[in-house]
Image: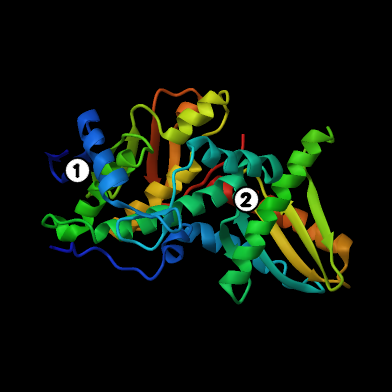
Amino acid sequence: MKSYEEGPHTKHRFTVTPKESESQFHLVSREQLKHNAKQGVNYWGGSDFPTMLIWAGRIYDFLRVLEGIVGYYPARLQSYLVGYNSGWNGADVNSRLLTDLPANDGNVRLLSSGNGVLSGAGWGRSEIEYDDATGSVQWRFPEGTAIGLAARQDGLRERPACPFVAGFVAGWTNRSLGTKSEFQETECVGKGDAHCVFESTEYLREKTE
Amino acid sequence: MVIPRTVRSESPGETFIIRPPVDLSEALREELSGLRNLQGWISAAVTRRDGLAIQHTFSKGQQANALCAMAAAIVGSARATGEELRQGAFNYSIVQYVDGLLLVKEAGAEAILACLFARNANLGLALLTMTQIAKRIEERLEEL
């Protein structure tokens, strides 16, 4: 699941194969999910955050509806913020679930667990690249994110469809590494790209066309 | 069970607010100081188009963050309205309250200038000054 490239500095690459995604699904969406029958509500990883299945297209709808009112940029930030909290909390809960020996004080290990959790939860299979010399991080979804795929069903769009996921990977990354990075969607299947790619940036300076 | 020693931080919010590069902040702080002499001026902020504060004169960051988010929403919704009604590009927005005036103007392709004034401020002069400062902010941002 994890491989490392050695060079003048360490470049970490964490992948999830389709087979591993299958086993992550059993772990994340079955074993780690507890059902409170009285409430009819699920709880993940021993946390007290109510958890539920929701169609990815409905997450996309939050962006779509909001951007129809206030425009893309403010809608993107609000969607990103929600995703950020989700990623942060997810990493926080997962830090208590990891049972293997911590590498690099546990920070990189926690980062590396993010894509397994995401694919196991049905968000999309991804690989993470982390260059510990530059601090740059990339999350790449070779088949797209679930939200991006849902957006594509709705028709191609001009701008990325997954600020929620950009926020999520930012929250997970920052919680893991103790960094303060933003992420931007550099490729999105929702706008016709072959993959979804999220790249870290120190400070996003996005300009209108 | 081995618990990895991961980084601790109080809350996600504290890590979310990304500080702009120092040169960017300083350039904008200098421009905002030009508004201080206007009669009725209360506070001002420069925000990214998405509503994340870049620089402001508020004593509390929380107030600035709220204004910046709202300013971005005002510009976004005004632009959308303009497109829907085929009225062309957005120029500026004036919101008049019982106690004050909120002026919002784009400052180039990547920023918005928002200023809060007392109700009795000279609106014409405030708009003129804001227009000049927004232009300079745009130029400063392009330089960086």
Q: Residues within 10 Å of mark 2 (few under 14, many from 20)?
A: many
Q: In terms of secondary structure, where does tag 1 sit?
A: strand
Q: How many marks?
A: 2
Tell me if I can see residue A15 in this picture.
no
Residue B30 coordinates in the image, percent (x, y): 61, 65
Q: Residue at x 38, y 71 (%)?
A: B10
Residue A57, disc = none
Residue tagged by mark 2? B111
- Whether residue A182 sits left or right of residue A2 in the image: it is right
Depth check, front residue: B112 or A67: A67
Is residue A146 at least partly visible in the picture?
yes
Image quarter hosting the N terminus of chain A = top left
Judge by depth and name the residue closer to the eye, B61 or A120: A120
Comparing A160 with A123, the one in front is: A123
Front residue of A105/B52: it is: A105
Under tag 2, what secondary structure?
strand
Q: Give the percent coordinates (x, y) of residue B121.
A: 86, 70
Q: Disc 2 marks which amino acid?
A: Ala
Q: Residue at x 78, y 63 (%)?
A: B102
3D distance between C-alphas at marks 1 and 2: 36 Å
Which residue was labeled with disc 1?
A: A12
Quick check: A7 above or below B9? above
Which quadrant would the C terminus of chain A be assigned to in this image?
top right
Going by the image, does B43 lie left or right of B140?
right
The image quadrant that residue B83 belongs to is top right
The amino acid type of the residue labelled 1 equals: His
At x 48%, y 37%, the residue is A56
Quadrant position of residue A179: bottom left
Determine the image quadrant of residue A178. Answer: bottom left
Determine the residue positioned at 68% across, 39% down.
A68
Question: Mark 1, residues whose alpha carbon is within 10 Å: few (<14), some, or many (≥20)?
Answer: some
Residues under numbered marks 1 and 2 in contact, where contact means CB atoms less than 8 Å apart: no
